[in-house]
Amino acid sequence: MCPDVITQPRRDAAANLNFFTGTIMLNRHVGAGTRALVLLAAACWCLQNGASAQTPADLPEWRQQRDATVQPVDIYAHATAAQLSAAVVGALERVYVPNIASQDVSVIDPATMKVVDHYGVGRGPQHIVPSWDLKTLWVTGSAKSAKIWGSLASIDPRTGKLQQILPMEDAYNMYFTPDGASAIVVAESRRRLEYRDPHTMKLQGSLTIPECVGLNHADFSADGTTAIFTCEFSGSLARIDVAGRKLLGLLKLAKGGMPQDIRLSPDGRVFYVANMMTDGVSLIDADSFKEIGFVATGIGTHGLYPSRDGKKLYVSNRGSHAVGGPPHGRGTVSVIDFATRKVDATWPIPGGGSPDMGNVSADGKRLWLSGRFDNVVYAIDTGTGQVVKIPVGHTPHGLTVWPQPGRYSLGHTGIMR
């Protein structure tokens, strides 16, 4: 029989249950018997108020109770096709491609599938990063050595032209805090995260993580309080407190390898981590920060991009385990279904290739990826998997498509929310 404390009418049953159970369970002075009663009461409430009994078996008991009393999460709800912000009105429809070796950016008009511009952008351009306010595209440039610094260059998306180049000790990648108060520059070679003013790039503070070798890619929890960064050369992940600017923990992946890109599932429950050496995607529970599964995809798993409807995850498999692989490799793109966590389809690159990083067009109809070792860009039809190849500069990397739907950008090539 269910306890009366749950069956009595109230103005907001769900809110009161959350408050009641949270208060009791967090009180260290409450005995085991009372805790058990609270858990029973919570379960009864869920049954009496029509909560779904179909919860994944891998969820711990406290997560099942919590998830039964809250609204479903969809972190990509505001990044679906056609939800363009007023901030991108007037932006040119372009694909911006950073070419590492030729140290320039190729600009593609997606309507004609041709390069319409190119210009130098400083040393070692790695990624094109949309700013949090969607008004600037930043080109991150990594350091060549301790003495030869990298750079940050800005592009005006309304004109497609370069604005300025700032010297930066090392700027392999860049993210933004969910509140937009800080840019987080990833100084990979220094194993350091630099919090900077998102407009002027003036340093605000930093977090050094000595154990994280190859600090490079990240994504944020659904509530934005924590982020997980991949440590490419130590086969591990680093979890940080975003506002507190401190390390919360490290997780060594079961198969080690070389973790690359990382992306959160639409429901906010699981981080997908591309692993170049294990040829697949590791699954990390977003709450417990524990590894819970693995999805095999293809050789040299590298980039991760959600479809515009948030139902699929496009996975680029670079076709090689080498950091500098050969051209015309066994590159493919795998399509994972978020609901089943299984591969639905695999698209080969005709004639071989090296699909690396990119993003999805605003309408969701094309997946744009750099061909890292082939000096091309792939425009892939997301309905058929057909590929168009466009020649660009030497060693293209983290391209972005612009504009993209969303209220704000969390960085990289467009982690939109």
Image (cartoon, rainbow, N blue to C red):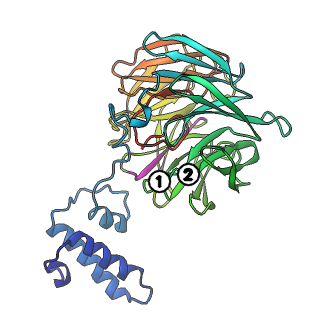
Classify mark 1: helix, strand or loop.
loop
Under mark 1, the amino acid is Ser
**In the rendered image, which residue does mark 2 sit on?**
228
Q: Residue at (18%, 83%) from the top-left corner? A: 3
Measuring from the top left, give residue 91's x and y in whole percent.
Answer: 46, 26
Q: Would residue 75 be seen by someone viewing this image from the given angle?
A: yes
Classify residue 279 as left or right of residue 395: left
Image: 343 above or below 174: above
Q: In front: 306, or 297? A: 306
Measuring from the top left, give residue 262's x and y in whole percent.
Answer: 52, 42
The image quadrant where one finds the N terminus is bottom left
Q: In front: 361, or 43? A: 361
Classify mark 2: helix, strand or loop.
strand
Under mark 2, the amino acid is Ile
Classify residue 217 as left or right of residue 37: right
Indicate yes or no whether the magenta region holds residue 378. Answer: no
Q: Quadrant of residue 30?
A: bottom left
Q: Main secondary structure of the magenta part?
A: strand
Q: Residue at (75%, 42%) from the top-left corner? A: 189
Q: Residue at (19%, 73%) from the top-left corner? A: 44
Q: Quadrant of residue 246?
A: bottom right
Q: Which residues are magenta?
A: 268-276
Q: Residue at (70%, 43%) from the top-left corner? A: 188
Classify residue 108 as left or right of residue 186: left
- Tell me how far mark 1 sits from mark 2, CA to CA: 8 Å
Image: 141 above or below 97: below
Q: Are marks 1 and 2 in contact (CB under 8 Å)?
A: yes
**In the rendered image, which residue does mark 1 sit on?**
221
Measuring from the top left, give residue 148's x and y in whole percent.
Answer: 83, 34
